[in-house]
Amino acid sequence: MTDRSGLSRRGLLGAVAGVTAATALPAVPAWGADDVRPGAVNRPTLDRYDRQIVSGLSSEKALRHLQVLSEHIGPRIGGTQSEKRAADYIAGQLDKYGYNTRLEPFPVADKFTAQLEDVRGILPDDLCWQAGAAPAGKLDVTVEGPVRDVGPATAPVWPADVAGSIVIADDTATARQAVVTEAAARGAVAVILLPADQVFPRRASAFSPSTGLTEATIPVIGVAQVQKRLIREALAVVNSLPLRITTTAHRGLISNNVIGERRGRGGANAPIVAVSGHYDSVIGAPGANDDGSGTVLTMELARVFSRIPTNATLRFALWGSEEQGLVGSRYHVAQLDQAQRDRHAAVFQNDMVATSWDPAITYWLLSFTGLANTATDAVRAAGVRLGYDPRMVGPVQRGASDHQSFQEVGIASANFSWRGEISPAFLEPPYHSPEDTIAKNVSLERLQVSMELIGTAAYAVARS
């Protein structure tokens, strides 16, 4: 067992109790094994093995984990202390379920974040106010001042009272250096760069401005589209909007994969069946659906499978630093020798499995190669038994999640996700945004169905 430091499981669960009472939560679904699931086309035809899985699953237990991750810990940026706290919590749960649990550490790039505080309490407090900080700006400082809007960075209109203020400007990379330099010369204490609005259903994420900015004597931060809108809406109705900004440089970072394993009855060389998700999130996003949902699906299946013997060795893996380019899963795969790779029967990756966005009615089977494999075949068959087959599309060629790391070396894997019916590229508006919260972007019905699909599929492979 790898040594772990940070807030204990007991401490996290105690702290989240206060969060739960104040948070609007989605309704916990309740249906019998033979009931038609929400959105399903057909009545289920479950075998006795399927019933073992579905009867044990609890979206309420999964929700508790999700509250810890997305509400109490919040954004889990790869390699930072928040990600480590999440890793420790997940590992503690897998320990509790009886798995041989380990952290798999690996280095990642520096991160630069900012936290906005509304001094007067005017801005909504039901979303995240973390943002990105420019590495070339002033870091590890706290500044405070009223907001002054200068409009486009390419043609700013400077008010007379810039000194001591926080300047906001519509961002353009080519104009960053000039507007920041001018703001500092006029006595501003910080600059907030506002992103261009993206085309629906996309919304711009928070960002750490780097391109075009080589030197700044004041903090420079990049906010998300929804944060930009709310700041400007507030400025339209109040005389003064004072903010406090704290910037932080996170350097010398180590991220971790969290892996819980139980050897199967097949012995040391038994096939490996893995269920996985990524537990990190992007800057400025609490990551309730991306990918808190896939994380808690994995944790809940680990709990259920802890009581069910299988021929295959089971691995429940939560990948760190996926959002930086699949760093954690690629590191893990690189450590596997060919014999270990050959033992993998299937890897079931789960990324964004619970959005409450109404148009996300299609359950996508996403394969990096575009071809079917053991993982996609097993989930398709599970969908038929659960009455969901007409709602499933795929396998469709798409990477961009941790299944890609395994398929690149020939391991059967796929990513499974609820998305818009036209294309898997149609993700919900809260994607990678401060609004990726339980209240705004999680359906426990979709989470429950996802757990049933992956659980019954994984059991079918693991018991054979």
Image: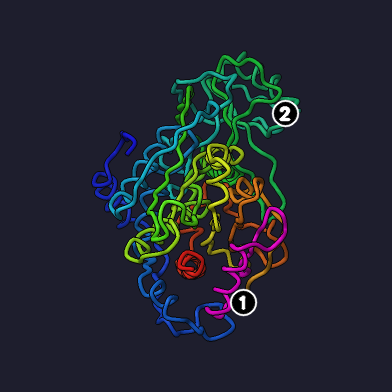
* Picture disc at residue 326: none
Q: Is residue 306 magenta?
A: no
Q: Quadrant of residue 388?
A: bottom right
Q: Quadrant of residue 305?
A: bottom left
Q: Is residue 382 magenta?
A: yes
Give how far across and how far down residue 26 sits, in percent.
42, 66
Give how far across and how far down residue 91 sits, in percent.
35, 45
Question: Would residue 367 be found to the left or right of residue 339 on screen?
Answer: right
Colour theme = rainbow
Q: Is residue 133 above or below residue 420?
A: above
Residue at point 41% right, 61% down? 301
Residue 231 in sight in this render:
no
* Amino acid bearing label 2: Ala
Using the image as rendered, state which of residue 133 and residue 323 is in the foreground: 323
Q: Is residue 280 above or below residue 26?
A: above
Residues drawn in magenta: 361-389
Residue at point 60% right, 51% down? 403
Using the image as rendered, state which of residue 284 and residue 458 is in the foreground: 458
Q: In the picture, which quadrant includes the N terminus?
A: top left
Using the image as rendered, state which of residue 142 and residue 329 is in the foreground: 329
Dot 2 crowding, Cα within 10 Å, few <14, some 14–19, many 20+: some
Using the image as rendered, state which of residue 270 and residue 37 is in the foreground: 270
Residue 71 in sight in this render:
yes
Which residue has dot 2 on it? 173
Q: Which of marks 2 and 1 precedes in the sequence?
A: 2
Q: Is residue 2 above or below residue 140?
A: below
Give how far across and how far down residue 103 sits, in percent.
40, 39
* Amino acid bearing label 1: Asp
Which residue has dot 1 on it? 389
